[in-house]
Image (tube, rainbow, N blue to C red):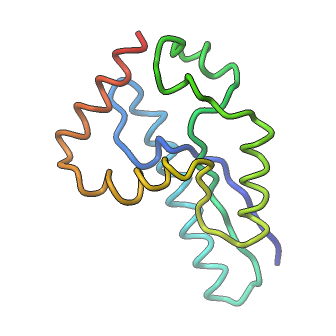
């Protein structure tokens, strides 16, 4: 019984050319979290698992990943605000928490309907702009 909060990223929902391992590991965290949550529910363990998928967060990740010129990081959220979103979602037993409504809409209602090749090209262009 209890609550688990795993930190993934919005990168979990799209392919990531030029950062394939990062994107894939975040997808793993989301998939793993959902599967464990369902397992806990199936045995009535009274526990939940939430995957926090923040968008841009104002941390040293931007500099370490050489992403300073990328427009995606212009409106980065504070770590404290993202942590609050994750904590609140975890307390409510939400499966996935995304810290921005617009990102949530995009990832859940737009991205899944785009042709995969188009999505790959868009993702790659986004990464190339930062380098």
> Which residue lies at the image location 55% right of the left edge and 43% below the top edge?
9
The quarter in which the N terminus is drawn is: bottom right
> Residue 21 in the image: x percent, y percent?
44, 33
Quadrant for residue 62, please give it: top right
Against 26, is 110 above or below? below
**Left or right: where 112 falls relative to 118:** right
Which residue is nearer to you in this view: 36 or 129?
A: 129
Q: Is residue 100 left or right of residue 125?
A: right
Residue located at (66% from left, 48% from top) = 7
Report the side of 63 relative to 120 (left or right): right
Task: Indicate the position of residue 40 as horizontal and vertical percent values.
Answer: 67, 79
Residue 2 percent coordinates (x, y):
82, 73
Identity of the residue drawn at 76% across and 42% down = 81
Q: Nearer the viewer, residue 73 or 17?
A: 73
Q: Quadrant of the C terminus?
A: top left
Q: Quadrant of residue 42?
A: bottom right
> Measured along the vertical axis of the image, is residue 40 above or below residue 36?
below
Q: How many marks?
A: 0
Q: Residue at x 58, y 61 (%)?
A: 96
Q: Does 19 sit above or below residue 60?
A: below
Q: From the top left corner, tell me how far across and down residue 29 is, in percent.
A: 56, 52
């Amino acid at each position: 019984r209890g609550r688990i909060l795993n930190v993934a990223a919005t990168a979990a929902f799209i392919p990531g050319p030029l950062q394939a391992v990062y994107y894939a590991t975040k997808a793993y965290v989301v998939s793993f979290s959902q599967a464990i949550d369902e397992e806990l529910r199936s045995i009535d363990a009274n526990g939940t698992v939430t995957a926090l998928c923040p968008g841009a967060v104002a941390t040293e990740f931007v500099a370490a990943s050489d992403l300073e010129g990328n427009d995606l990081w212009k409106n980065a959220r504070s770590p404290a605000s993202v942590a609050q979103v994750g904590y609140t979602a975890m307390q409510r037993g939400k499966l996935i928490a995304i810290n921005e409504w617009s990102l949530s809409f995009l990832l859940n209602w737009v991205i899944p309907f785009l042709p995969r090749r188009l999505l790959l090209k868009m993702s790659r262009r986004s990464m190339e702009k930062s380098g």
